[in-house]
Image: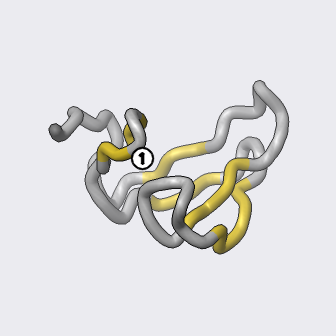
Amino acid sequence: MAFFSVHPVGSRAYVLADPSGANLVRSGAGTNFEINGRIQPNQSMQIIGRPHCTQNMVW
């Protein structure tokens, strides 16, 4: 199942400041993938792919 994304590939998104704390960056969609780093609140990231559904979540 594919979900509509308001962030097209190539655009930028930001981590929300609330709740506080960093978000994990993983090597793939799902908690079973390796953690590659963290994105801090208010930090931006480039969207490099379309949404992927796994583990009852959209990644």
- Please give the count of numbered marks on the rendered protein: 1
> On screen, 35 above or below 19?
below
Q: Residue 31 lies in what quarter of the image?
A: bottom right
Q: Position of residue 22 (x, y in %)?
A: 77, 48
> On screen, 27 above or below 13?
below
The residue depicted at 53 percent of the width and 67 percent of the height is 33
* In the foreground, 31 or 38: 31
Residues packed near mark 1 inside 10 Å, few (<14), some (14 to 19) or many (20 plus): some
The residue depicted at 22 percent of the width and 33 percent of the height is 4
Which image quadrant: the N terminus? top left
- Of all residues, the one furthest to the top in this rendering is 18
Q: Position of residue 5 (x, y in %)?
A: 28, 37
Circle 1 SS class: loop
The residue depicted at 69 percent of the width and 49 percent of the height is 23
**Left or right of 2 in this view: 5:** right
**Left or right of 55 in this view: 22:** right
Q: Residue 18 lies in what quarter of the image?
A: top right
> On screen, 12 above or below 5?
below
**Left or right of 29 in this view: 37:** right
Q: Which residue is mark 1?
A: 59
Q: Position of residue 56 (x, y in %)?
A: 38, 34
- Of all residues, the one furthest to the left in this rendering is 1
The image's colour scheme reads secondary structure
Mark 1 is on which residue type? Trp
